[in-house]
Image: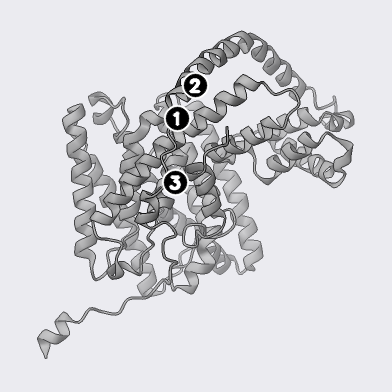
Amino acid sequence: MEGDLQSSPPSRRSANYQPTLWDDSYIQSLPDSSLDAAQVNLWEKLNEEVRHLIDHTKQKDIIELLEEDFLVRSFKNENGSFKVHIVNDVKGMLSLYEASYLSVEGEDDLDEAMEFTTKHLSNYLKEPLLIHPSLVEQISHALELPLHWRMPRLHTRWFIDAYERQENMNHSLLEFAKLDFNMVQSICKKEVKEMSSWWRSIGLAGDEFSFARDRLMENYFWTMGCTFEPHFWRCRKEITKWKITEIQSLPNCMRKALLAIINTMNDTACAFSKEKGLDILPQLKQAWGDQCKAYLVEAIWYNTRYIPTLNEYMENAWLSVAISLVINAAYLLSEDLTKEALNSLEFYFDVTRYSSMVTRLYDDLGTSTDELQRGDVPKSIQCYMNETNVSEFVARDHIRQLIKKYWRLFNGEYFSNFNLEESFKRYALNLPRMAQCIYQYGDGYGKPDRETRDKIISSLIKPIPL
């Protein structure tokens, strides 16, 4: 009797996640869209043409940027108010709108510019016949989401289509952009096939793990969105594996999941050591240790039915969201990592903290409703509601304001910290962009059958017609 009780697994809450949309057989069947020899030759020829075009116009661009800066500074009159006539300069308004999202804490002028330009650009959408159709398209795209908050790869896909419709477009530049997009996409497609084979081989996608999200393709999409350049192949592959294993919250079958985590970590460190001669295993272990401690805090809150204050929640949630784990892994796997940089590594820079904060809040806005229905711990919205006794509508608005605040704090660190590698800062920038991309219309990770699916098809599967 005692043996039977010991062998009976405890019941586990079912999250009722959707099954994967992208099984291995489908992924392996994706056609090879690599450029043929003629297209590669054309890409190389156009690459040189575009390079010369950029060099030729570089001085002109600098002058235009200086003129634009002067225009921005001259948008206000001597009383400090925005001049009435600038609402007629649609391109200038768009530039000022985009610039306002690069603000840091204390830049009140840019905060005013954001409110001013948003209002007047919105008015143009109410009377679209007053301006050129291409400007209507640009305004609509910008107001949906500013460029600084957008996932770069999807914006590139949109911009190529929009640029092709412009009357004064450069044919060589357009053709090169299409070829380059398709070439990078074909590389990513090969990588995701390799990752899918690996995912099936480690055995974490079967019925035993039905409570977890089977999201190989979505995880690769996330990492590709953070670093799509071909030479960052190692980072994309290994971070995809890390994001896969970190979602297995160590249930009754924790031994199998834990073994997968340990093996992945060891394999990653071993391969890197052979190639680079650097031992990154201690740092990887520390990152995972801190991650598990944050998960443990949330488990204690859940089991004791404790609702923390918003600040208390955020002090743990910026770690439990796993962004710092991913950023540190990306840093450790960078191609230009040196022994000196490894020995002087600080795990939690402010740029990492603010990137994690923004990502966590985007996640909460998109997923908290579904996660509470599954019986998860309260998120930032519920913590603020409980602490201040306000409605969910008010709490959500407060979280959106916090997102803007943490973006400004992130900007301040991003633009002023010259001691960090540019690739590291770029990865930290793209993570909250990807969170916004995934959670813009709800839980695009737990329920990836709508917008997330379309974004994956656009960026990873469907080439641009040439």
Q: CA distance from mark 1 to mark 3?
A: 24 Å
Q: Crowding at label 1, few (<14), some or many (≥20) Cα neighbours within 10 Å?
A: some
Of mark 2 and mark 3, the one earlier in the sequence is 2
Q: Position of residue 257 (x, y in %)?
A: 24, 60
Of mark 2 and mark 1, the one earlier in the sequence is 1
Residue 329 position (above or below residue 219): above
Q: Crowding at label 3, few (<14), some or many (≥20) Cα neighbours within 10 Å?
A: many
- On the image, numbered disc 3 is attached to which residue? 222
Q: Position of residue 205 (x, y in %)?
A: 31, 62
Residue 41 position (above or below residue 224): above
Q: CA distance from mark 2 to mark 3?
A: 27 Å
Judged by depth in the image, the label closer to the viewer, 1 or 3, is 1
Label 2 with label 1: CB-CB less than 8 Å: yes
Kindly identify the residue that appears in the image at 41 percent across and 29 percent down.
Answer: 423
Q: What secondary structure is found at the residue carrying circle 3?
A: helix
Closer to the camera in the image, 69 or 385: 69
Q: What secondary structure is found at the residue carrying circle 2?
A: helix
Q: Crowding at label 2, few (<14), some or many (≥20) Cα neighbours within 10 Å?
A: many
Closer to the camera in the image, 203 or 301: 203
Q: Position of residue 416 (x, y in %)?
A: 50, 26
199 horizontally vs 420: left or right: left
Which numbered circle lies on residue 43? 2
Residue 324 position (above or below residue 169): below
Which numbered circle lies on residue 35? 1
